[in-house]
């Protein structure tokens, strides 16, 4: 494996994020109930939009992606995004698991007033994304400017009945973080 360079890998990864998380209709596809699409159909649909890649290229993207954004089905015929969907109704079959005592959320100063008022909202994603460590949260926040890392009282939230999930690529997911759990 390894035919594609960094730039080609990033281009395909961005395209897969768009299609598998947000706009499958762009390439004439529908995600199934668990977010999967047939790789053959994806390749054909992408080709019609001028994006050329084959199965080996997809396998290289999945294997090398820095955040393990995608997963192949056990039979290797389908692919899905591990998290980050804005398409509604995708059931990732996540089972609630016990979180560490604290989790982290990376954001920027301009959102803080609103976060203090409303807690963390999922916006157009399916979940609020939390990180297991400060460094990761810092990187998430830095996508928008000077990062601010918030500490979340995950243990307290769980005691209060909030379900925590962890995606296949290690992102912690919750429906909402009420403001009292933003430390
Ligand atoms: C903010 C990347 C105002 C929140 C990363 C964030 C992550 C509020 C933004 C993944 C708010 C939403 C997700 C409130 C939350 N008022 N602002 N009440 N509640 N916000 O991109 O967590 O590269 O939807 O702080 O690694 O930044 O895509 O979420 O700044 O895992 O794989 O609203 O995206 O992964 O932004 O990032 P996003 P996020 P990928």
Image (spheres, rainbow, N blue to C red):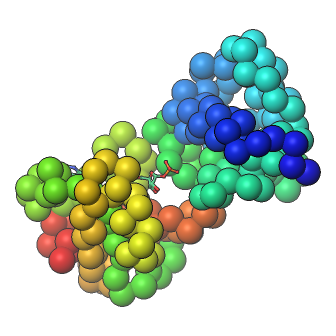
Screen quadrant of the C terminus: bottom left
Left or right position of 148 against 41: left
Q: Position of residue 182 (x, y in %)?
A: 20, 71
In the depicted view, which residue is nearer to us: 69 or 96?
Answer: 69
Q: Position of residue 107 (x, y in %)?
A: 27, 58
Q: Is residue 3 above or below residue 140?
A: above
Q: Position of residue 99 (x, y in %)?
A: 44, 80
- Could you tell me if residue 17 is visible in this image? yes
Residue 152, quarter of picture: bottom left
- Could you tell me if residue 131 is visible in this image? no
Q: Residue at x 14, y 72 (%)?
A: 180
In the depicted view, which residue is nearer to us: 148 or 151?
Answer: 148
In the depicted view, which residue is nearer to us: 7 or 63?
Answer: 7
Residue 170, quarter of picture: bottom right
Q: Position of residue 17 (x, y in %)?
A: 59, 39
Q: How many marks?
A: 0
Q: Residue at x 50, y 48 (%)?
A: 84
Q: Residue at x 43, y 48 (%)?
A: 126
Q: Is residue 74 above or below residue 59?
A: below
Q: Is residue 157 above or below residue 94?
A: below
Left or right position of 87 against 140: right
Left or right position of 174 against 5: left
In the depicted view, which residue is nearer to us: 180 or 158?
Answer: 180
Q: Residue at x 70, y 45 (%)?
A: 6
């Amino acid at each position: 494996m390894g035919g594609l360079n960094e730039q080609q890998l990033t281009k395909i990864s961005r395209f897969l994020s768009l299609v598998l998380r947000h706009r499958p209709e762009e390439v004439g596809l529908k995600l199934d109930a668990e977010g999967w699409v047939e790789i053959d159909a994806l390749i054909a649909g992408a080709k019609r939009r001028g994006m050329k890649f084959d199965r080996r290229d997809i396998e290289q993207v999945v294997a090398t992606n820095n955040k393990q954004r995608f997963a192949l089905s056990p039979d290797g015929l389908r692919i899905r995004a591990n998290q980050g969907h804005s398409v509604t109704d995708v059931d990732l079959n996540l089972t609630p698991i016990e979180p560490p005592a604290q989790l982290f959320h990376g954001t920027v100063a301009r959102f803080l007033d609103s976060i203090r008022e409303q807690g963390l909202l999922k916006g157009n994603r399916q979940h609020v994304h939390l990180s297991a460590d400060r460094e990761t949260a810092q990187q998430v926040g830095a996508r928008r400017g000077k990062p601010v890392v918030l500490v979340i009282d995950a243990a307290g939230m769980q005691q209060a009945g909030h379900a925590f999930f962890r995606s296949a690529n290690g992102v912690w997911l919750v429906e909402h973080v009420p403001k009292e759990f933003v430390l």
